[in-house]
Amino acid sequence: MRVVNTALRHRFDEALRGFLSAATAPLATTAPDLAPFGAAAEAFVLDGGKRLRPAFCYWAHVGVGGDDDDRIVRAAAALELLQAGALVHDDVIDRSDTRRGAASVHRRFADMHRDARWAGDPDAFGQAAAILLGDLALVWADSMLVGSGMPSDALTNALPLWDLMRTEVMCGQYLDVLEQVRGGGSVERALLVAQLKSAKYTVERPLHLGAALGGAPDDTLAAFSRFGLPLGEAFQLRDDVLGVFGDPGATGKPAGDDVREGKRTVLVALGLEGADGSGRRLLAQLLGALDLDASGLATVRDILASSGAVERVEQLIAARLDEAMSALAALPVSESAREALSGLATAATSRDG
Amino acid sequence: MRVVNTALRHRFDEALRGFLSAATAPLATTAPDLAPFGAAAEAFVLDGGKRLRPAFCYWAHVGVGGDDDDRIVRAAAALELLQAGALVHDDVIDRSDTRRGAASVHRRFADMHRDARWAGDPDAFGQAAAILLGDLALVWADSMLVGSGMPSDALTNALPLWDLMRTEVMCGQYLDVLEQVRGGGSVERALLVAQLKSAKYTVERPLHLGAALGGAPDDTLAAFSRFGLPLGEAFQLRDDVLGVFGDPGATGKPAGDDVREGKRTVLVALGLEGADGSGRRLLAQLLGALDLDASGLATVRDILASSGAVERVEQLIAARLDEAMSALAALPVSESAREALSGLATAATSRDG
């Protein structure tokens, strides 16, 4: 899925490359052993990611009349470092071996430990390194935003939102983990997690951040919420569908990983609600089955389709996208920003994954 | 060990209590399930900790002529939230069951999982919750500093140091983990870890932060380094000794935990260097032994004492403390700050733990 256009993506990547090269260089000087640690952070950020959050931030900023220069590109790209930290920790939490089509960070460090025949448990070392590397990415996200060159009054406007966004995503992740172990989640609870983890974190807050950096007043932020929240929910619902039905080549995750991890998505909650007795029992049993194979995944897909859950989710996505597009039409932004945001909205919720 | 005087400690605690109550209140409104998550963060921060880093920051600030008001108390207390995040992650990494004389955060959440008979692995849930709670504490540290009320030019001075400090501590932790698995560490490498993890993080950077918030010029920061770096090393060396010989009632950790975790401290490196062949083999074998009992710990203590390592470390501590005290005499700070910093230095490196 090409969500963000090539020229803008290139600007974000150049900003990230510049920041990371300045941030990692002193590490190797401090201790040569830190070089692989810095390099892993750099590779994780530069080798993947859709730059979706930076794009929302950038277009909100430019749309409200903020300057289109390197400062907002750097500030917006900081969101990608925050996302890197969150994903590295998420993979430790979910024990995911794969991310963006390659080995996850904790897996890479576990392999490094195995190859070097060090003492102790390779997996414990991998987890330790990934926890610390995720922490480092979270710190660097901050540095990149604060050091973006944005004037200090713009930062003063934006930093409370930045903190709120980070609090929301951590709390959303916790509720997500809680839903997985507690099981039997309702559609309402799955929607709350989707709101915190995605609608706010992926769309609404990046828009707010860009608008606040551009000096937009509170009522403009509220208008961005009317666009961003339904769009963000639609995005998460699409992600839920792709997590079960998506092509691993496009998602970067093995087919069925969400099912193996027992994720309690809205799609799953609707499936549990809509399936008949035996379908419900089978679905509940297959959720979180670490040994789920292709035939088990096919069964899950059948139940989700025949229960009407897939159709319901597609309806929810369409309704939310409609709502977002109406709000976009009324958004007080430049026409070029409106067009770009419309393209982002369509691409981020498309079936092509 | 009472390092920080009661009145100042009380001011830090009030600032932390106020911040945390404002930060956790919205969580329970968002979702009642978040209440235990917020409460655990609050309890961890308020139930323990020596407030050593905030005290260094505060006295540097007041010492260079900065205002002694609630703003610097809040900014300095933010260091305690950062430390909370680092410790919660550290306990996951080290798989420590105990912190500050009570169950560690991941252990508490694992117990919550077990008590509720939720699905899946209680330990995996505990780790997930602790990783996210540590992330939240790191975010809140930022919020508390940035929202301390300090003027924006003071924050602009201080934030690059704040970022540098956080990068240093994550890198120091990574090197520490690396030394444990790689084994056979030299005295030099153990000293480098001590410098990054402790000398800079615990003493030098908190001093810099306070001084920078007070508008101190670069040469004053350099003078603080001459005091803080040797003192910080002495503090870490004392901590290493207490980790093996300390009273669990004072350290809050079971006796011998550092040995069980295989920590490659300067004390241990000197022990491996100074012991005879059989002592060295025995020490290497007992380091990282998860089943280390009282008799094993007594053996480790004997080897460290008879190899001369303990005496060497005591000499290193005394020499560094001397160096720090000479630098303190020349530090361009008020006499009341000099006296307070002298008291902190003595208490933080004392044998009483």
Image (spheres, coloured by chain):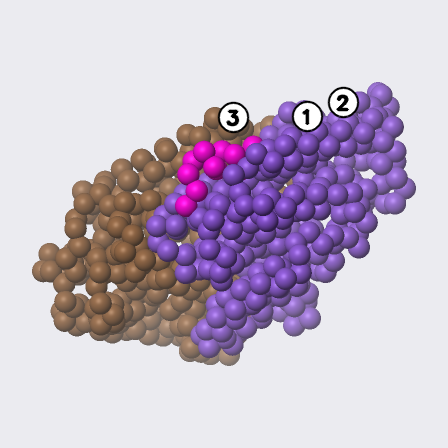
Chain colours: A purple, B brown
**Which is more toward the observer, B304 or A121?**
A121
Residue A216 colored magenta?
yes
Label 1 – label 2 distance at C-alpha: 8 Å
What residue did someone put label 1 on? A187
What residue did someone put label 2 on? A273
* Chain letter for mark 3: B
Q: Amino acid at mark 1?
A: Val
Where residue A149 appears, as percent x and y from the top left, is: 41, 60
Where residue A275 appears, as percent x and y from the top left, is: 83, 24
Residue at 58% across, 45% down: A335
Residue at 67% across, 24% down: A186
Where residue A198 appears, as percent x and y from the top left, is: 61, 40
Q: Amino acid at mark 2?
A: Glu
Labels 3, 1: front one: 1
- Judged left or right of residue B329, residue B153 is right
Name the quarter where the C terminus of chain B is drawn: bottom left
Residue A351 sits in quarter: top right
Residue B55 colored magenta?
no
* Chain letter for mark 2: A
**Secondary structure type for disc 1:** helix
Answer yes or no: is residue B110 visible: no
Answer yes or no: is residue A52 visible: yes
Residue positioned most to the left: B335
What residue did someone put label 3 on? B32
* Chain letter for mark 1: A
Residue at 36% across, 74% down: B308
Give the residues drawn in magenta, as a range: A215-226
The reply to whether discs 1 and 2 touch (Cβ–Cβ < 8 Å) is yes
Badge 3 density bin: few <14, some 14–19, many ≥20, Cα 10 Å: few
Identify the main secondary structure in magenta: helix
Where residue B314 appears, as percent x and y from the top left, is: 29, 69
